[in-house]
Amino acid sequence: MTARSQNGQGPLSGKTALITGASRGIGAAIARDLSERGAYVLVNYRTSEAQALAVVDGVRAAGGSGEAWQCDVSQLQSAQDLFRQLSEGGHSVDILVNNAGIARDRSFRKMGDEQWGDVLQTNLNGAMYCTRFAVENMAPRGYGRVVNIASVVGQIGAFGQTNYAAAKGALISFTKALALEVARYGITVNAICPGYIGTAMWDAIPAKVQAEIIADIPMQRVGDPGEVASCVRYLVTEGTYITGQTINVNGGLYRGG
Ligand code: NDP
């Protein structure tokens, strides 16, 4: 149990969860959900401090507990500083949700190194950096849950998203390989592949393209951030024998493994 974190009631009482990119959207929903199950939540943001603090206020108003932490996960030094400060503050991360992600869409022939690099650095290397430090926390204690928020785009691709698809596809492969290495320490590692979820990232897609996407979704709607959060909750509470898996939360858009 984390020395400093105070926890609520529920299956995650006594656990501390770090959710990256939790100032809004899917990450905020995950923070709220895990908090409702008793976890002490560390709400990470890069620039959106006010939104992250509002998420923490909401968590506390609902009877949970947690705090906001700034960190740019795409920067190794920033991630290292975060985990050092957490440790100095008495927090041990039991649950890591690598949710922070960005999109910088451009067709491949027009895509610059910056758009390619920013997306790989945040969506893939950022997850790797946080996982590296978190696993060092978890392994000696014989318990850990790592959930990587990938994407259906990492499974089937999307026009204008070679960078994003490459990062998310690699995140899925990273999940499978890491699961093999850390299972012996009681750490499970899984990926969730959301389909299209109604957040700021979805809002940035042009309306015409949105309509085409929805027409392809068997459930004929985008998902709600809470529907991804439910899946994270299941993996970290009930999923004691689930590791190295990719779980699809996509309204039927893609039905493969
Ligand atoms: P949003 O754009 O709504 O939120 C992204 C979050 O990530 C924000 O809190 C943002 O914080 C944070 N963030 C971005 N870069 C960094 C960074 N370098 N360090 C720390 N935090 C960062 O996205 P969603 O909620 O829609 O997406 C969440 C995850 O789900 C992403 O990984 C995304 O790829 C994935 N996903 C989303 C889908 C969708 O349709 N919405 C579908 C499939 C996957 P700040 O504002 O402070 O930068």
Image (tube, rainbow, N blue to C red):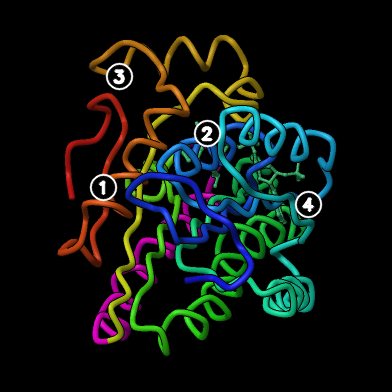
Query: Circles 3 and 1: CB distance less than 8 Å?
Result: no
Indicate whether 128 appears above or below 102.
below
Q: Residue 29 carries which label?
A: 2
Disc 2 and disc 3: Cα gap in Å? 22 Å
Disc 4: residue Cβ within 8 A of ligand 1's nearest atom: yes
Disc 3 and disc 1: Cα gap in Å? 17 Å
Residue found at the very far bottom of the displayed protein: 140
Question: Earlier along the polypeptide chain: callout 4 or callout 3?
Answer: 4
Number of residues whose C-alpha sits closer than 10 Å to that of mark 4, classed few (under 14), some (14–19) or many (20 or more): some
Query: Circles 1 and 4: CB distance less than 8 Å?
Result: no
Q: Main secondary structure of the magenta part?
A: helix
Looking at the rendering, the quadrant in which ligand 1 lies is top right
Q: In this view, does 226 lie to the left or right of 167?
A: left
Tag 4 residue: 46
Tag 1 residue: 247
Tag 3 residue: 217
Disc 4 and disc 2: Cα gap in Å? 17 Å
What span is colored magenta in the figure?
Answer: 159-184
